[in-house]
Amino acid sequence: MVFLVAGTSPKAWLFFPLIFPQFIDFSTNYIVQFFILITTYVVLDFISLIGYALLAQKLITWIKANPKTINTISASVLVIIALIIVVTQQY
């Protein structure tokens, strides 16, 4: 499932052909360079996704323990957005 999400991401489709060639020296063995770049990308992507998952897990636990706090934060944000719209709206 993770491969499907990552493989269909526009970020991946644009990142590899547009950014990777800038780091490749085609006068030397470029297959090894591609392998190093792809391995680095996969490891960093995996670490960042694990970080997001751990953060989301902690956030869900906190939200379940403090449902009133999240409701207060949400209501405050909506009121602030409404005030910004009232102040900036020109008739």
Image (spheres, rainbow, N blue to C red):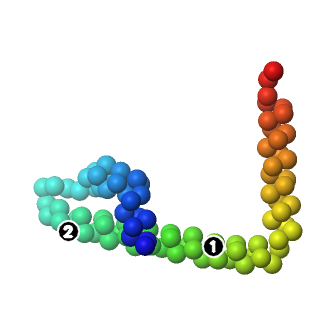
Q: Secondary structure at mark 2?
A: helix
Q: Is residue 79 visible?
A: yes
- Using the image, determine if residue 18 lies above or below residue 47: above
Measured as percent of width and height from the top left, residue 13 is found at 34, 54
Label 2 to label 1, Cα distance in Å?
A: 34 Å
Q: Position of residue 73 (x, y in %)?
A: 82, 59
**Residue at 57% over, 70% down:** 52
The kind of residue on which mark 1 rests is Leu
Q: Kindly check if marks 2 and 1 are in contact, taking CB atoms under 8 A apart as contact.
A: no
Please tell me which residue is depicted at 26% across the width and 52% down the height of the picture: 21
Q: Which mark is residue 55?
A: 1
Q: Position of residue 71 (x, y in %)?
A: 83, 63
Residue at left offset 43%, top offset 73%? 1
Image quadrant holding the C terminus, namely top right
Q: Nearer the viewer, mark 2 or mark 1?
A: 1
Q: Going by the image, does 91 lie left or right of 19?
A: right
Which mark is drawn over residue 32?
A: 2
